[in-house]
């Protein structure tokens, strides 16, 4: 299976996670691991906090991690935005600042998973929602999941393409199921099978 055929899952979350609770990093890392285990690629905003820990989980599982930076160059990424390069196989320098980066980031993905976040995360959620992307919302000891539910309820908008779940494994499964349904594909699962003697990206039917 080529990288071009792998589903790309954006993980959105807070760069500053002081309000997120003690289990936020563990859940973020587990989401990253499950993205790889279930045969997808992670894309993030090339930032710190929740997205970094998700990317860390991907790297630990031998998966692929792509970051979309608000900066126009690596120098600007490091010195002006003070963002990391760790846990990313490729960084795309958009040069469009945070709001422009958010649009490119979510549109590059087949689906978005939202963890503990702040206003930037809500921005990524609303952009992805308006674009009709499948969205998974991780429930936790933070307020982001309830805020998103409130936005949907008070905005009188459908939530049929949005799933809420507190188990990272189940959340990734549900999001990938929504992606396959949206693309009209059969129920195929690509997994990283290196540990059982197969090649990474083998097709399981």
Image: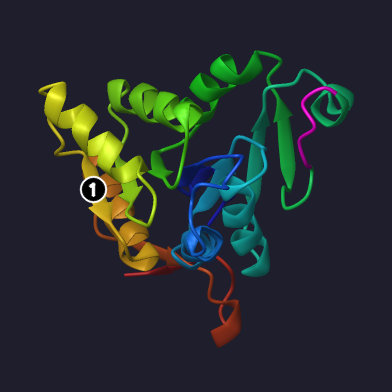
User: Is 24 or 37 nearer to us in this picture?
Assistant: 24
Q: Is residue 126 above or below residue 35?
A: above
Q: Residue 148: image x %, image y %?
A: 28, 35
Q: Residue 154: image x %, image y %?
A: 14, 24
Taking the magenta stretch, the answer to whether it contains residue 185 is: no
The quadrant where residue 63 appears: bottom right
Q: Is residue 86 left or right of residue 17?
A: right
Taking the magenta stretch, the answer to whether it contains residue 82 is: yes
Residue 16 shows in this picture: yes
- Kindly identify which residue carries mark 1: 163
Looking at this rendering, what residue extends furthest in the bottom direction?
Answer: 196
Q: Which residues are magenta?
A: 80-84
Q: Is residue 164 above or below residue 121?
A: below
User: Within 10 Å of the Cα at label 1, are there few (<14), some (14-19), or many (20+) other Cα atoms?
Assistant: some
Residue 157 shows in this picture: no
Q: Is residue 8 above or below residue 132?
A: below
Q: Residue 10: image x %, image y %?
A: 48, 41
Q: Residue at x 31, y 61 (%)?
A: 166
């Amino acid at each position: 299976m080529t990288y071009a055929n792998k589903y790309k899952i954006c993980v959105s979350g807070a760069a500053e996670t002081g309000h997120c609770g003690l289990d936020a990093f563990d859940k973020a890392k587990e989401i990253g691991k499950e993205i790889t285990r279930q045969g997808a690629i992670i894309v993030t905003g090339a930032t710190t906090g929740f997205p970094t820990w998700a990317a860390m989980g991907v790297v630990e599982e031998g998966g692929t991690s792509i970051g979309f930076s608000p900066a126009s160059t690596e120098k600007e990424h490091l010195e002006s935005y003070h963002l990391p390069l760790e846990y990313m196989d490729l960084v795309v320098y958009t040069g469009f600042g945070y709001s422009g980066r958010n649009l490119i980031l979510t549109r590059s993905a087949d689906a978005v998973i939202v963890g503990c976040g702040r206003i930037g995360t809500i921005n990524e959620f609303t952009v992805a929602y308006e674009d009709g992307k499948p969205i998974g919302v991780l429930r936790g000891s933070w307020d982001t999941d309830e805020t998103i539910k409130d936005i949907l309820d008070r905005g009188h908008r459908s939530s049929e393409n949005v799933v809420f779940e507190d188990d990272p494994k189940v959340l990734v499964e549900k999001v990938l199921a929504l992606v396959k349904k949206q693309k009209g594909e059969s129920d195929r699962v690509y997994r990283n099978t290196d540990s059982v003697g197969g090649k990474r990206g083998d097709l399981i039917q």
